[in-house]
Image (cartoon, rainbow, N blue to C red):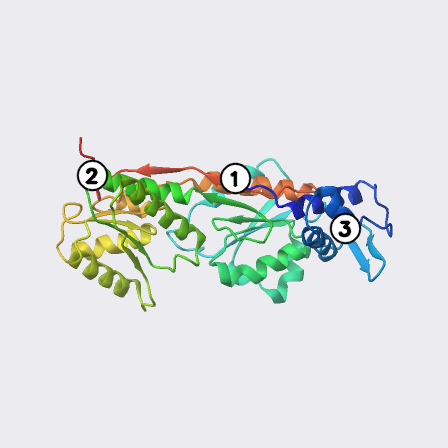
Amino acid sequence: MKKQPLYQVILNDIKNDILTGKFKPDEQIPTELELAERYQVSRITSKRALAELENQGFIYRLRGKGSFVKEAVARKVSGNKTDILFVMPFPKDIGFGNYTQGIFQAIEGTSYRLVVQSHESLNQDNLTDIIQHYAGIIFYPINRGGDLEMLYSLYLHQMPTVILDKVYEGIEFTTIVSDNQQGGFEATSFLLKTGLEKVAFVSSQPIMEISTVRERYLGYLKALHLKKNMSKTLYEDSGHDTMASFVDEVLDRALSEGIQGIVAENDLVAIALINQLKQRGIAIPEKLSIVGFDNIQASELLEPKLTTVSQNFTEMGLLACQKLIEQIESPLPKCETIVVEVDFIERETTKKIRK
């Protein structure tokens, strides 16, 4: 769990004093200098805390006079505002996890209702209507850049929001993620234990732009580091029009470079690799071992069945909804990053560990 930034500690303390009535409307609060001395921080830190309080509507600032309390209203759910919105990017994608099962478990027996919509339903034009209609949002981002502005807008409007799957630095929402780095580590370590000496990591997305993929790659690097004298090989999509063309290039390079095993970014990439290997008549895992990530339904129906890393989507959905309800019902919600364990599942696309 990440340690709370010092400016956030100051911000939460002042919020609490305002909400509990210690500071009254229009009463002056401590200055930047006073806060810096009280909390033993720099004035830059105390200034940021005051700036965030102003952005969130708790205080107003008068040049040359200081900061003063605005009328504070604790966030509570009104009688007709009990809908929770789950924004998901791939409503019909077979590779998307079943988070909704966990969300339904969390709202069972409560007054909350779940509404599921795609990303197209949430944009800057209808942001005000969405904030007024919904009690809170569970948000599954597509990528770091495309959703950053929307998430920051929700943050500035103090909209109760929980992020699934990806980490956004600088936006203080609770985030639920799988232990992607451990998954990448376990997948790579297993291949190395089967006696393979050249293992590659394959990603259809830029690893520096997607936090989940980057963490899986770091786990891959960690396993190679611990094995010692193992060189890394990264095959990263540089702009192919289709998955098929990317997979073709990856396999051409992997086979020519003597790669013996591949840790794929996810199951969909792994399955595409396996299908292409089968078309080429290349034996799996005798010639090339493959490990995926996600344990989607197709991974077990495939022939040969895919060795993969399983994410607990139900648990992630449950935790996301529980934390969202805490935000909705608490005037001072706690923001945190929660990491959910993963499981390695050995099937038929990898060799057995040498004894």
- Residue 28: x and y in percent read 85, 50
Q: Residue at x 52, y 39 (%)?
A: 318
Q: Which residue is mark 2?
A: 194
Q: Which mark is residue 33?
A: 3
Q: Which residue is mark 1?
A: 318
Can you see residue 350?
yes
Q: Image height check: is 255 above or below 219?
A: below
Please identify, in this view, whether the residue under mark 1 or under mark 3 is nearer the observer: 3
For marks 1 and 3 on the same chain, the one whose residue lies earlier in the sequence: 3
For marks 3 and 2 on the same chain, the one whose residue lies earlier in the sequence: 3
Corner quadrant of residue 192: top left
Q: Which mark is residue 129?
A: none
Please identify, in this view, whether the residue under mark 3 or under mark 2 is nearer the observer: 3
User: On the rendered image, what quadrant is the C terminus found in?
Assistant: top left
For marks 1 and 2 on the same chain, the one whose residue lies earlier in the sequence: 2
Q: Who is closer to the viewer here, 218 or 137?
A: 218
